[in-house]
Amino acid sequence: MAKQAKATKSSGGDNFTRWLVIGMVTLVVATGAIFSVVGQKSKANESFSILKDFKVGPTVASTVDDANGAGITFSNGAAKTIDLWEDPQCPVCNTFEQANGEFIDDLVRTKKANVVYHVVSFLGNESVAAANAAYCAADEGRYLDFHKAMYLVQPVLENSGFYSTENLIKIGSYAGLTTSTFSDCVTKGSKLDKVRAAYESMTKYKVQGTPTVFFNGKLWERKNNAFLLEEFTAAFEAS
Amino acid sequence: MKNFNAKYQPVITLLCRLLLGSVLLVAGALKAFKPDESAGAVAAYKILPTNLAHLIGYALPWLEIAIGILLIIGLSTRFAAIVGTAVMIIFIAAIVSVWARGILIDCGCFGGGGEVDPSKASEAHRAYLMEILRDLGLALTGAYLYFFPYGRLSIEKPLQNIEEQ
């Protein structure tokens, strides 16, 4: 052991070679990291191309009731009420949204049901940021549009840097949110207290995961994992 | 033991270099071209602020590749061994940290990563143990290379040996 421990001098061990190697390693790591960051940016831009033909609907006003778990509430006097619990980053919520989102949107817009969107955020910082942006959008009557656009571009992996302030504002711009009120609200995280309240209300409503649906306060126990539209529609009609 | 080491040290060094080097190279290569996965995997440990975690997620695979290549070709072995051992110790600490905090994730060691479904808790915990043991083993090969960096088939040779020959 002693022999090699002392033998620090070697054909490749002089100072010049050592710094050369350290320099090259640093160069490789830096180039790789920059390449990755740039790649990510262009990939994000690519995913925005889905939103190119995105059509926004008329604005729909909503309220946020702290007593009601701080959910985004569309109350229109209909007899039925649907409570939805979703996390912006949860992939299964996206499956749910792609299957039933259109139908629920329609219920809200045609005033066939009161819908409460509980935007919870237990999947990390980017869920919090996205939920905050969703509340900002709700303030301007564009929650439905923002929600739809956000799920269309949802990244495959959680907390991968996609739901950044910059990208959330960009999603908003496709969803008809171009005011500085919205971008300020996203940047400053003005709605974080609502986001926290919504998250904390999960225990109160005994919601353990997302997506969770209640029809008139009664938990929807689905039979099919794919969130089939027929099953959802039937459950809604029966409620 | 001392004789054994004296006799076979160059071969052991070669094997350690190839083992640690190839594991690092493969782990790095599998992640380097999926930066979003890698960034998300680091963020899932919830140790660093998200932005910093993403940056490390982008850079780490390339560091693994660079160190892996250095070890395999046997250039600046001691320096590479120090870095390799250090990252293994950091990996062990990170896994211990998530385990202790009750977070369930896929380590993302060879790609993938992110949260694990709570129903798979026991699998995740077994995986944590295996990962810790594996990284501990790799850290030990790194430590051996620190003390005996010069062996067979390496670009770098100790001067003494050259003089002896």
Image: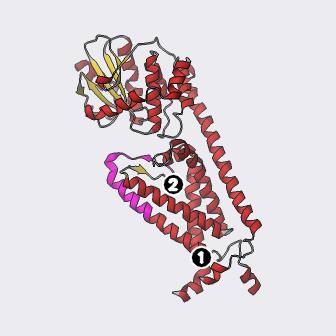
Tell me if residue B87 comes above or below residue A67 in the rendering.
Answer: below
Which residue is labeled 1 in the image? B147
Amino acid bearing label 2: Phe
Residue B139 drawn at (x, y percent)? 52, 67
Which residue is labeled 2 in the image? B110
Q: Residue at x 40, y 58 (%)?
A: B128
For disc 1, the chain is B
Magenta residues span B108-132
For disc 2, the chain is B
The reply to whether the magenta stretch includes residue A100 is no
Q: On the picture, is A175 further left or further right than B159?
A: left
Between marks 1 and 2, how big is the CA–CA gap? 28 Å
In the rendered view of the protein, which quadrant contains the C terminus of chain B?
bottom right
Q: On the picture, is A120 further left or further right than A206?
A: right
The reply to whether the magenta stretch includes residue B129 is yes
Q: Residue at x 29, y 26 (%)?
A: A231
Residue B29 drawn at (x, y percent)? 59, 54
Q: Residues within 10 Å of mark 1 (few under 14, many from 20)?
A: some
